[in-house]
Amino acid sequence: MSKILVIGAGGVGSVAVHKMAFNSDIFGRISLASRTKSKCDAIAASVMTRCGVDIDTYALDADDVPAATALLNQIKPALVVNLALPYQDLNIMEACLAAGVHYMDTANYEPLDVAKFEYHWQWAYQDRFREAGLTALLGSGFDPGVTSVFTTYLKKHHFDQIDTLDILDCNGGDHGQAFATNFNPEINIREVTAVVRHWENGDWVETPPMSVKQSFDFEAVGTKNMYLMYHEEIESLKTHLPEIKRIRFWMTFGDEYIKHLTVLQNVGMTRIDPVIYEGKEIIPLQFLKAVLPEPASLGPTTKGKTNIGCIATGLGKDGTEKTLYIYNICDHEDAYAETGNQAVSYTTGVPAMIGAAMLLTGKWAGAGVWNIEQFDPDPFMEMLNQHGLPWQVKELDGALKF
């Protein structure tokens, strides 16, 4: 058993800590830190009630590298699981290097002042982590994360070569709100309003946000509209599986969400540059985040299911061209009953726990900076089945027609 520090007390942090507490044979002393200690204390109380495990809580400004380093030196964890905001990734990586602690996250770094989602800032830490003998595991959520492991699992067991890959993220849940986001509103809206990029024939292809729409019939959810988006796993997958000729990412949105988001964009509320209000600088999107429902509060009212997976086409190991669909279905109400959080948090928090388990048990190891698809998918896939995110593979009649 090992000590572990989780940074971030939102819905994902809550799920991850609950699941770690349920697996005390792997996770020894669990600590949870956030800027707002009361959020950590609330999670700790729930963990005690549900799991009978006591966890330590701390107040921490994760942007303060000396303070984070001091906390790491005090706790002496084997691993830091960063479930804070993506803007904070580099500062937490710096603290891990300073204190000699392994690092893991679920989303890549992005600068605060521009919606730019790229791995190069974190990949630049490769030499420093390798020379320190430390592991940094990037992107151990669902997407990125599980979808990348799904891809390498298909490559290892079913394909000699993958030619096209489509990642499909469907949230069929209904939270009863006129407009709300199922994870951090600031991050969600920055992603949705960013210029779309997908990888095709060795180059990036750009399209305007929300301009490419297709419908797809998702098992256990039904037919939904999904939109082409950019997501960071495209960059890492095209780098580590360069054989794939085309990689696209799709996410479903309801008409009401699109209508509200369009209005908010038109009136400037999704801007990330500062404006002056009553003599003070404010960021409109950050103000919008403050008035929207807290995603963690949506658990009690959210019903329905998520369906997230990958469709791959290529040359099968039997020598024939084939298309396989690998996916997970997660129920919002089941997730809430187990951890007090809805399925969007659950589907990210469980893979965060599993990625941490891979590192703590030594099933994944290596000094340097790694994306999740660079490791053996099999032990991770086994734990998905064991810990609430069972998956299935089915063969489709052919490649997607769009």
Image (cartoon, rainbow, N blue to C red):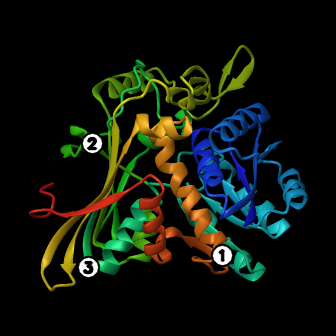
Q: Is residue 93 in sight in this rendering?
A: yes
The residue that mark 3 highlights is 159
The residue that mark 2 highlights is 226
Q: Secondary structure at mark 3?
A: strand
Q: Quadrant of the N terminus?
A: bottom right
Residue 44 image position (x, y, % from top left): 72, 39
Q: Amino acid at mark 1?
A: Gln
* Between discs 1 and 3, the one toward the N terminus: 1
Above or below, 365 against 328 in this view is below
The answer for how far apart the CA atoms under marks 2 and 3 are is 27 Å
Q: Secondary structure at mark 1?
A: helix
| Between marks 1 and 3 in the image, the one whose residue lies nearer the viewer | 3
Q: Residue at x 48, y 68 (%)?
A: 380
Residue 133 image position (x, y, % from top left): 74, 80
* Between discs 1 and 2, the one toward the N terminus: 1
The residue that mark 1 highlights is 126
Q: Report the front residue among 230 and 15.
A: 15
